[in-house]
Image: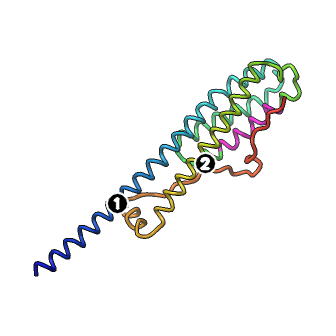
Amino acid sequence: MSTVLIVVLIVIGALAIIAIGMYNSLIRLKNRVDEAWSDIDVQLKRRYDLIPNLIETVKGYASHEKETFEKVTRARTEAMSAQKSGDAKAQAQAENMLSSTLKSIFALSENYPDLKANTNFLELQRELSDTENKIQASRRFYNGNVRDFNIKLEIFPTNIIGNMLGFKSRDYFEIADERERSNVKVKF
């Protein structure tokens, strides 16, 4: 009788250790996803801070392009609101719209040679381009962590533990429009 009890206790102990290991790996991956999302937030904040300066610089040369400035400002506001929601899909959509409207600001510079030569504009353009590159790198890092987390949640037997403990898969931070997959082109 005591041998059966020992075997049962060993099996229960082994199952508990396995469940704890699965739980810890899910927590580790969840935290990596959260960290990666935080990296995206930092870069998007930097982008949001650069946009008003860019608009003010361009306004000095192209004050009659009011509609373009309003579109960019509106897209920035919507992106900032989406950021607060915590919904990756909504934020990706808003960011895609913002990227699209920012391209219109850079297109304006083609019509204003003095603007293209303005040091402030060139510096803001360089910083925004650098920020866009960092956003792309942060997206890749985030999406890689989301992939790993979602795979862990889908494979057996971790999916059982994950579902029991309320872990939910995460959405990728994707670019919806194929045209948005290209970098912002900066021409001088």
Q: Indicate the position of residue 8 as horizontal and vertical percent values.
A: 20, 75
Q: Quadrant of residue 57?
A: top right
Q: Is residue 102 above or below residue 147?
A: above
93 left or right, relative to 59: left
Q: Which residue is mark 2?
A: 140
17 left or right, relative to 158: left
Q: Residue at x 36, y 55 (%)?
A: 24
Q: Residue at x 73, y 21 (%)?
A: 56
> Nearer the N terminus, badge 1 or badge 2?
1
Q: Is residue 57 above or below residue 45?
A: above
How far apart are labels 1 and 2 at the CA level? Answer: 27 Å
Amino acid tagged 2: Arg
Q: Main secondary structure of the magenta part?
A: helix
Q: Indicate the position of residue 41 as horizontal and vertical percent values.
A: 55, 38
Q: Secondary structure at mark 2?
A: helix
Counting labels gives 2
Q: Indicate the position of residue 11 as horizontal and vertical percent values.
A: 24, 73
- Magenta segment: does it hold 100? yes
Quadrant of the image containing the C terminus: top right
Q: Indicate the position of residue 125 as horizontal and vertical percent values.
A: 74, 28
Magenta region, residue range: 94-107
Q: Are marks 1 and 2 in contact (CB under 8 Å)?
A: no
Amino acid tagged 1: Gly
Q: Residue at x 63, y 46 (%)?
A: 92
Quick one: 48 or 71, which is closer to the camera?
48
90 left or right, relative to 119: left
Q: Which residue is mark 1?
A: 21
Q: Is residue 89 above or below residue 74?
A: below
Q: Secondary structure at mark 1?
A: helix
Quadrant of the image containing the N terminus: bottom left
Of all residues shown, which one is farthest toward the left? 1
- Magenta segment: does it hold 116? no
